[in-house]
Amino acid sequence: MATRDFQGKVVLITGASSGIGRAAASAYASQGAHIVLAARRESQLQDAAREVEALGVRALPVRCDVTVEEEVHRLMRETEAAFGGLDILVNNAGLGLYGPVEGFSEAQLRQVFDINFFGLVRVTRAALPLLRKRAPGSQVVNVSSVLGHRGLPLLGGYGASKAAVNLLTESLRAELASEGISVLLVSPGLTETEFRDARLSAEGWKQDAIPLNAMSSATVASAMVRASRRKRRETVLTLPGRVMVLANRWVPALFDRVARRIVNPAKAP
Ligand SMILES: NC(=O)c1ccc[n+]([C@@H]2O[C@H](COP(=O)([O-])OP(=O)(O)OC[C@H]3O[C@@H](n4cnc5c(N)ncnc54)[C@H](OP(=O)(O)O)[C@@H]3O)[C@@H](O)[C@H]2O)c1
């Protein structure tokens, strides 16, 4: 039998009950990793855990809200009890926010930051003692978004939470390098998941269909596993996403004009 790249490794994924996180659980499992699946919806977590076990590895589903410190510590205690340490932490749990800066409430913005940014910080800090047990060679994989690299109209609150993740990732990467813990950033573009149904919207705002092809969560997951294997520090997904990040770097004023047209503002009827 061919060697699997993550044979016997332990991977903890937040937001593993749906979308990219669930697909990542299967993708790492198919490379031989045991998976700790964390999220709030227990029945979806159990289903995802069964999918993982069917690939011949162990799955540990743990109900965990990343905004609750005690639940995050319990997640790490259960991981340590089951596996003794952690090789890869995938910080994937996330929530979107749609609407103009003037329109979303401060409470909505705080909720989004509490999951996307503070949740990631909380989980990472709690996981570090377990990642150190498997260093050198352990990893933190932070899921950002192309929107964390360039602000677009009506997506500024969400994008800001991901831009904060990007910057924190750079700092953490430098802080942990000497211990042999890699810190990777994966920035998907538009992906077909429950994300748009779950996200918050400013009152009276809804988004029209986006005129771009969405990737599948399986495509994002295989790019993530590839990045993990190669310890690739930064992965920006989809061609339009890469073009956007590059265009913004080289011709930002031109891209400002393009950006106005990318998202077609639409108020709810
Ligand atoms: N879809 C896209 O177009 C896209 C593009 C770029 C980046 N992303 C990023 O990709 C990541 C995954 O999103 P997705 O597209 O797969 O959307 P999704 O299907 O809605 O998945 C989001 C996941 O996050 C979990 N989650 C939300 N709040 C949580 C909390 N407080 N504690 C623990 N888990 C929580 C959800 O599980 P529970 O509800 O069960 O807790 C769910 O498993 C997010 O970070 C998102 O920002 C998505």
Image (cartoon, rainbow, N blue to C red):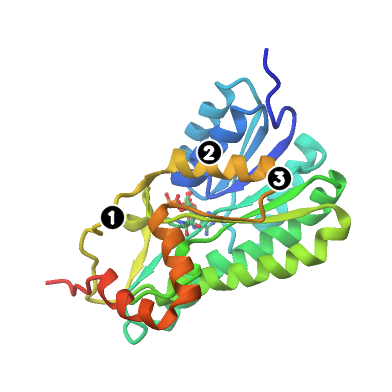
- In this view, the residue farthest toward the top is 1
Q: Nearer the viewer, mark 1 or mark 3?
A: 1
| Circle 2 crowding by C-alpha within 10 Å: few under 14, some 14–19, many from 20 | some
SS state under label 2? helix
Q: Nearer the viewer, residue 256 or 51?
A: 256
Give the mark nearest the N terminus, 2 or 3.
3
User: Relative to residue 165, is residue 264 drawn left or right?
Assistant: left
**Picture layout, residue 48 above or below residue 170:** above
Asked where in the image residue 224 lies, by quadrant, the reply is: top right
Give the SS element for disc 3: strand
Q: Position of residue 69 (x, y in %)?
A: 67, 63
Q: Kindly indicate the quadrant of the structure image that contains residue 6.
A: top right
User: Callout 3, which amino acid?
Assistant: Ile
Decide which of 234, 51 is in the foreground and name it.
234
Circle 3 Cα neighbour tier, 10 Å, few/some/many (<14 / 14–19 / ≥20): many
Q: Secondary structure at mark 1?
A: loop
**Callouts 1 and 3 close, C-beta under 8 Å:** no
Q: Label 3, on which residue?
A: 88
Kind of residue at disc 1: Leu
Q: Which residue is mark 2?
A: 222
Quick one: quadrant of the C terminus? bottom left
Question: What residue is pinned by disc 1?
Answer: 212
Whichever of labels 1 and 3 marks the residue nearer the N terminus, that label is: 3
Q: Earlier in the sequence, mark 1 or mark 2?
A: 1
Give me the residue at 46% from left, 63% from top.
146
Where does residue 137 sit, x and y in percent of width and height?
81, 45
Q: Which percent across, then down, holds residue 187? A: 52, 57
